[in-house]
């Protein structure tokens, strides 16, 4: 246990930093009934790509390169569609993001793909809302979605819906929730709770913990009692793999929560890093992941084109361009309006099918993986269309 505990503070700091990218409170963009310009689909369509380049943070510049590479890969895949890609650097700064967004529209951009961070995406949405231009942001923060801003990042809501629905179909409809007392943890808890209600499953209690090593240790008795008293058939965790999750899945079985009889479910990817798959406490657990075959194909093509594996964020840039290309190929002048972007059939992207919703969020086709013998095994395939069990 002590090796695991000694690493918690280091891991927790990394997780908090990562989550700060995703869960930033922001003002709601201006709501438009059907925003978007009229375009000439026979000519090259000017598309602005906003990336966090020219930043003092090396990771921003690496993200920027991956996002641009993936966008160019998507353009190369388009047949009969011409995209005039124009790249603008935001330096990861909301003020600069808003400024270059206005510059991009002044220079003729008909749609904006990016930026990466929630505050920047919100700033961009507000900056160009009165210019009749839509924004396909890389954020997964549903709080900044709406109006002229659509988010491409995978959301907790989408993941929770998929997993709760699957759990109920497997006869495990009594679901307890365990979450951190953080902003991300609360958003995750709400997503799971809403998914339980939407699927007609049964709430089996909610338990929380302070996001610290001592906080988790002190909370385990109460978490255990909540799970037992609620008669839970499954426990849905908001915890990520490199912080609270290893500790929770170690201590709960030690306190009488048998993960062989009560199914553990993860809101985040439990196969990243791969070492997590070897933890005794996660064996048998379920989590959701993108279409494995599509994801592997994208990684292989990116690697062949650019000489290295893409970061996970890169696929979102590919998706944004793929959606634009599919709409422009249809040959309609309203291809980049909100009505077109939210077409029910959706699009095929780097990791499977996805579609944009009227509220600015998205749905993605996800597979269900189960951890078996230290490996993630697909037990329910990602859907190939919008309809049926996956949704």
Image (cartoon, helix red, strand yellow):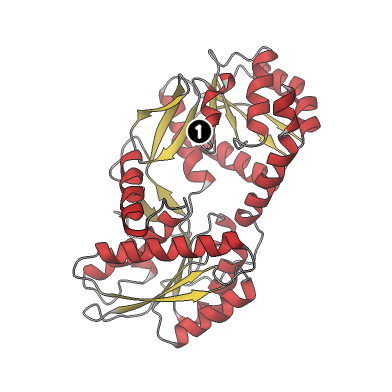
210 vs 315, nearest the viewer: 315
Q: Is residue 217 above or below residue 78?
A: above
Residue 189 seen = yes
The residue shown at (56%, 26%) is 175
Q: Splitting the image into 4 quarters, where does residue 75 fall?
A: bottom left
Q: Can residue 349 be seen by looking at this rendering? A: no
Front residue of this view, candidates 154 and 339: 154
Q: Is residue 217 left or right of residue 194?
A: right
Image quadrant holding the N terminus, namely top right
Outermost residue to the bottom: 106
Residue 90 at x, y = what percent? 56, 73
Q: Residue at x 43, y 39 (%)?
A: 289
* Residue at image location 27% in from the left, 65% down from the top: 76
Q: Position of residue 280 (x, y in %)?
A: 57, 18
Mark 1 neighbour density, 10 Å: few (under 14) some (14–19) many (20 or more): few
Judge left or right: residue 40 versus residue 64.
Answer: left
Is 206 rendered above or below residue 356? above
Q: Which residue is mark 1?
A: 274
Q: Residue at x 66, y 42 (%)?
A: 185
């Amino acid at each position: 246990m002590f090796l695991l505990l000694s690493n918690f503070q280091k891991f927790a700091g990394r997780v908090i930093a990562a989550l700060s990218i995703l869960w930033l409170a922001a003002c709601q963009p201006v709501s438009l009934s059907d925003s978007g310009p009229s375009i000439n689909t026979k000519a090259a369509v000017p598309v602005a790509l906003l990336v966090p380049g020219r930043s003092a943070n090396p990771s921003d510049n690496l993200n920027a390169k991956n996002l641009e590479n993936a966008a160019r890969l998507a353009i190369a895949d388009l047949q009969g569609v011409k995209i005039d890609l124009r790249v603008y650097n935001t330096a990861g700064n909301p003020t600069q993001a808003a400024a270059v967004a206005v510059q991009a529209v002044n220079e003729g951009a008909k749609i904006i793909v990016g930026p990466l961070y929630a505050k920047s995406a919100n700033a961009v949405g507000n900056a160009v809302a009165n210019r009749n231009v839509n924004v396909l942001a890389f954020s997964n923060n549903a709080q900044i979605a709406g109006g002229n801003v659509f988010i491409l990042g995978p959301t907790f809501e989408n993941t929770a819906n998929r997993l709760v629905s699957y759990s109920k179909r497997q006869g495990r409809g009594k679901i307890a929730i365990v979450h951190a007392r953080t902003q991300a943890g609360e958003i995750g808890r709400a997503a799971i709770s809403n998914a339980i209600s939407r699927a007609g499953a049964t709430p089996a209690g909610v338990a929380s913990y302070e996001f610290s090593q001592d906080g988790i240790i002190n909370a385990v008795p109460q978490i255990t009692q909540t799970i037992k008293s609620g008669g839970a058939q499954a426990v849905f965790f908001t915890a990520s793999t490199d912080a609270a999750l290893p500790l929770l899945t170690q201590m709960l079985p030690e306190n009488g929560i048998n993960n062989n009889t009560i199914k553990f479910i993860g809101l985040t990817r439990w196969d990243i890093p791969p070492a997590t798959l070897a933890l005794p406490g996660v064996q048998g657990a379920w989590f959701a992941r993108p279409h494995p075959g599509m994801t592997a194909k994208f990684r292989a093509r990116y690697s062949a084109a650019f000489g290295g594996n893409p970061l996970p964020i890169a696929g979102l840039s590919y998706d944004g361009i793929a959606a634009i290309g599919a709409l422009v190929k249809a040959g309609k002048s309203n291809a980049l309006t909100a009505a077109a972007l939210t077409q029910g059939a959706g699009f095929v992207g780097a990791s499977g099918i996805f579609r944009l919703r009227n509220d600015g969020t998205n749905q993605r086709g996800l597979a269900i993986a189960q951890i078996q013998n230290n490996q993630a095994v697909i037990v329910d395939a990602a859907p190939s269309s919008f309809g049926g069990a996956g949704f």
